[in-house]
Image (tube, rainbow, N blue to C red):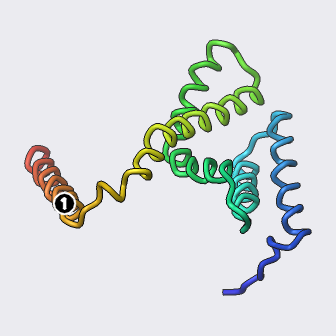
Amino acid sequence: MRRYGDWHLTLIGRWGIRAVALGIGALFALGYVSIWLNAAFGVAVVMALSMPGRRSGFGQVLGGMSYPLYLNAWVGAFAANFIAKRLDLPAAAHHALVCALAVLVAFVLWACVDRQILARRNGWYRPWAGQTAALSGYVLTGIGLIGGLWIFAP
């Protein structure tokens, strides 16, 4: 596999990635939406946000929100579609609403769930509890598979 080095960490690389992300964001604002722009925007944003450096509170919030955003972006899209149908929004406004609601949902989930679990997980975790949870998961999966095959077998 060919390696390209750390070009994205150079001054020109960092500003280039930011320019790509902002440029594609401007295209979104103008109503240009395509699967290729979405993919390029996602890559540029991830590269722009994954630069090494000093930790900040804002960066920790954004980093903490990334997994809830990944898992629950559909909730924001679903809500935005519900709202957009009733307000007859143009495509650019609809896309912005999807993004805003997805980020809002991710923030609320991070603040109410993930942050609370991370703050308490060392006090909750015990090896026997993890082993019991794993065993329970395997047993319940087995019961579901066997029950499904028994109920729906031809």
Q: Is residue 81 left or right of residue 132?
A: right
At horizontal 69% and vertical 48% (from top left) the residue drawn is: 35
Farthest residue in the left direction?
150
Q: Residues within 10 Å of mark 1 (few under 14, many from 20)?
A: few
Residue extending furthest toward the top: 86
- Residue found 16% across the figure and 52% down from its top: 140
Residue for point 77% across, 82% down: 5
Left or right of 28? Residue 65 is left
- Quickly name the residue at label 1: 138
Q: Quadrant of residue 94?
A: top right
Number of labelled discs?
Answer: 1
Look at the numbered disc 1 and give the secondary structure of its residue: helix
Q: Position of residue 4 (x, y in %)?
A: 77, 82
Q: Position of residue 100 (x, y in %)?
A: 67, 33
Q: Position of residue 123 (x, y in %)?
A: 32, 56
- What's the residue at 70%, 15% (across, down)? 88
- Foreground pick, 73 / 53: 53
* Image vertical order of residue 108 relative to residue 24, above or below: above
Q: Is residue 154 visible?
A: no
State whether residue 144 is above or below residue 102.
Answer: below
Q: Amino acid at mark 1?
A: Tyr
The answer to which image quadrant residue 9 occupies is bottom right
In the current view of this chain or complex, which residue is farthest to the front?
A: 123
Image quadrant containing the N terminus: bottom right
Is residue 86 in view from this perspective?
yes
Q: Judge from the rendering whether residue 4 lies leftward or rightward of residue 117; answer left or right.
A: right
